Image: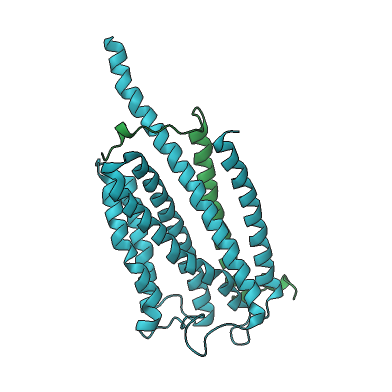
């Protein structure tokens, strides 16, 4: 059996399991989890806002590590460098998707809970900066026409990754409108045990979805790289064929 | 608990419904975008990749 066929079947099974996990997690979040006493039902945004936020800080590191490998391999082993580059762009796009959701659902929750859509506190601002950095990364890759685009993007991703720990630590380093960490934020942090299944299943479901998107986008990038190489070969062979 | 409250007229119902729709719209939209390009890229090419290091633009 072809390797691509095996990966395709694993991908389909993974996709079905992911949809099942997300469906179950959504039911737990909207129907089974108890209504929070202070904020009411709008607190249910928590069940995908927080998992999405956690994942939006994880995918930039996938991009960061892949970019480091790209820079290391680009002269030594160009084939491996292309693989790393495909992982890097896939991770950057998934990071933008997850951070966009984090910002938008946070705004919707903030308007209902705080009465404001946005405030320039350290957490929200650093998160917006992270989103802008990865959008810039994608714009650079899309619009730059130099032969060094991939290298420039890899260097940018190293700088972008510096913002990740700042986003994470912002609510501990500065006084913010954004609440303290739900987990590991001191003696009063944490959630009621009855809310844990909904939270845990949403983390699992959205993490599985993120991995699915990452691998799907990686596969697409590899196809694009292959067709780009094929076009390059044809453009070289064409004139030579005519000359013969 | 019944789910019908989510379609109510309160701000919390609107915002919760809107945020769920946003999540599905963005995630589903991105997956559909990849799938569309995947199908387009798959037409007329083999699924097994045979990349050649000699044409890497950065090398």
Picture layout, residue A63 above or below residue A46: above
Picture layout, residue B44 above or below residue B7: above
Q: Picture coordinates of residue A136 (x, y %)?
A: 32, 56
- For the question of whether residue A120 can be seen, the reply is no
Please state if A220 lies on the left or on the right of A69 as rendered. Answer: right
User: Most extreme residue toward the top, as rendered?
Assistant: A244
User: Most extreme residue toward the right, as rendered?
Assistant: B2
Total tally of numbered discs in the picture: 0
Q: Picture coordinates of residue A153 (x, y %)?
A: 30, 51
Chain A drawing hue: cyan
Please state if B39 lies on the left or on the right of B50 as rendered. Answer: right
Q: Residue at x 52, y 57 (%)?
A: A210
Q: Residue at x 39, y 83 (%)?
A: A172
Picture layout, residue A197 above or below residue A80: below
Q: Residue at x 47, y 87 (%)?
A: A186
Q: Picture coordinates of residue B28 (x, y %)?
A: 56, 53
Quarter residue A127 falls in: bottom left
Q: Picture coordinates of residue A19 (x, y %)?
A: 64, 56
- For the question of whether residue B12 can be seen, the reply is yes
Q: Between residue A6 and residue A215, name the one nearer to us.
A: A6
Chain B drawing hue: green
- Assign the C terminus of chain A to one quadrant of the image: top left
Picture layout, residue A12 above or below residue A184: above
């Amino acid at each position: 059996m072809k390797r691509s066929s095996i990966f395709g079947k694993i991908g389909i099974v993974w996709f079905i399991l992911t949809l099942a996990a997300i469906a179950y997690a959504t039911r737990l979040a909207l129907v089974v989890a108890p209504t929070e006493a202070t904020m009411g039902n709008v607190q249910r945004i928590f069940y995908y806002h927080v998992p999405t936020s956690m994942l939006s800080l994880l995918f930039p590191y996938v991009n960061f590590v892949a970019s480091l490998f790209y820079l290391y391999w680009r002269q030594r082993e160009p084939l491996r460098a292309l693989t790393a580059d495909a992982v890097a762009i896939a991770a950057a796009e998934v990071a933008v998707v997850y951070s966009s959701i984090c910002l938008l659902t946070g705004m919707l929750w903030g308007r209902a809970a705080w009465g404001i859509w946005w405030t320039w506190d350290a957490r929200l601002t650093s998160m917006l900066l992270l989103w802008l950095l990865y959008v810039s990364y994608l714009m650079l890759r899309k619009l730059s026409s130099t032969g060094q685009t991939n290298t420039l993007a890899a260097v940018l991703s190293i700088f972008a990754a510096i913002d990740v720990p700042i986003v994470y630590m912002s609510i501990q380093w500065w006084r913010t409108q954004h609440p303290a960490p739900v987990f590991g934020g001191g003696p009063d942090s944490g959630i009621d045990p009855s809310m844990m299944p909904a939270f845990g299943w949403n983390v699992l479901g959205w993490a599985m979805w993120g991995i699915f998107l990452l691998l799907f986008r990686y596969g697409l990038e590899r196809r694009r790289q292959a067709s780009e190489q094929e076009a390059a070969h044809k453009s070289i062979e064409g004139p030579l064929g005519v000359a013969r | 608990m019944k789910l019908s409250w989510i379609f109510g007229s309160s701000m919390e119902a609107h915002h919760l419904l809107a945020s769920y729709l946003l999540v599905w719209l963005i995630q589903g939209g991105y997956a559909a975008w990849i799938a569309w390009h995947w199908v387009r890229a798959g037409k007329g090419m083999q699924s097994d990749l045979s990349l050649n290091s000699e044409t890497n633009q950065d090398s």
